[in-house]
Image (cartoon, helix red, strand yellow):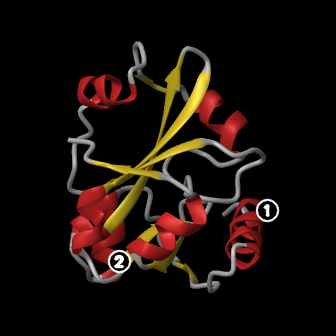
């Protein structure tokens, strides 16, 4: 467990006026499938926080656990060059969180964020809360508000 990363997520939620709904699990939930199994929800309601490298700048894509992000589609919509999955050290540097536990909030600096529009089909979403043992619940509208993300289809 990484109590500092989880504390940063809790602080970010509260600072944004959102509820602290962080849940901590005894077992690890580093994947959408593991999280959905632990929570008893549809894998599509899990919000994966995926970090990409766009010419050295981070891009955070909040995607449904059931989605495979189409990077060429995203790059074309953004009008940017090559987008590639970030290396673990890059993710840790820009988010303060390790791959598999990255949250949509609680990072040292604001990261450009995209929000998968398909997530709005779910009444309640679950997202990583900073480590492999923690998740928080939130609505699509609230997640959109607190992340100031650009909503778009990502697949």
Q: Looking at the image, which is closer to me, 101 or 77?
A: 77
Looking at the image, residue 72 sits to the left or right of residue 113; the answer is: left
Res 24 → quadrant: bottom right
Residues at discs 1 and 2 in contact (Cβ within 8 Å): no
In the image, residue 36 sits, relative to residue 103, either above or below, namely below
Q: Nearer the viewer, mark 1 or mark 2?
A: 1
Residue 17: percent from the left, percent from the top? 69, 81
Q: Residue at x 26, y 23 (%)?
A: 72
Res 120 → quadrant: bottom left
In the image, residue 133 sits, relative to residue 21, either above or below, namely above
Q: Residue at x 21, y 72 (%)?
A: 121
In the image, residue 54 sits, relative to residue 102, either above or below, namely above
Q: Looking at the image, which is closer to me, 153 or 98?
A: 153
How far apart in space, not on screen, are marks 1 and 2 (Cα)? Answer: 23 Å
Q: Which residue is mark 1?
A: 4
Numbered disc 2: secondary structure: helix
Q: Residue at x 27, y 42 (%)?
A: 154
Q: Which residue is mark 2?
A: 38
Residue 135: percent from the left, percent from the top? 51, 72
């Amino acid at each position: 467990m990484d109590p500092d990363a989880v504390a940063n997520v809790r602080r970010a939620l509260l600072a944004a006026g959102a509820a602290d709904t962080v849940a901590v699990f005894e077992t690890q939930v580093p994947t959408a499938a593991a999280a959905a199994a632990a929570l008893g929800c549809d894998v599509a309601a899990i919000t994966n926080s995926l970090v990409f490298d766009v010419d050295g700048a981070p891009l955070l894509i909040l995607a449904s656990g059931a989605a495979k992000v189409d990077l060429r589609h995203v790059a074309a919509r953004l009008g940017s060059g090559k987008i590639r999955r970030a290396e673990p050290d890059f993710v840790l540097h820009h988010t303060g969180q390790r791959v598999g536990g990255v949250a949509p909030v609680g990072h040292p600096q604001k990261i450009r964020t995209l929000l998968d529009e398909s997530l709005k089909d779910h009444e309640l979403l679950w997202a990583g809360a900073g480590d492999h043992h923690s998740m928080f619940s939130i609505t699509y509208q609230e997640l959109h508000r607190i992340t100031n993300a650009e909503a778009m289809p990502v697949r």
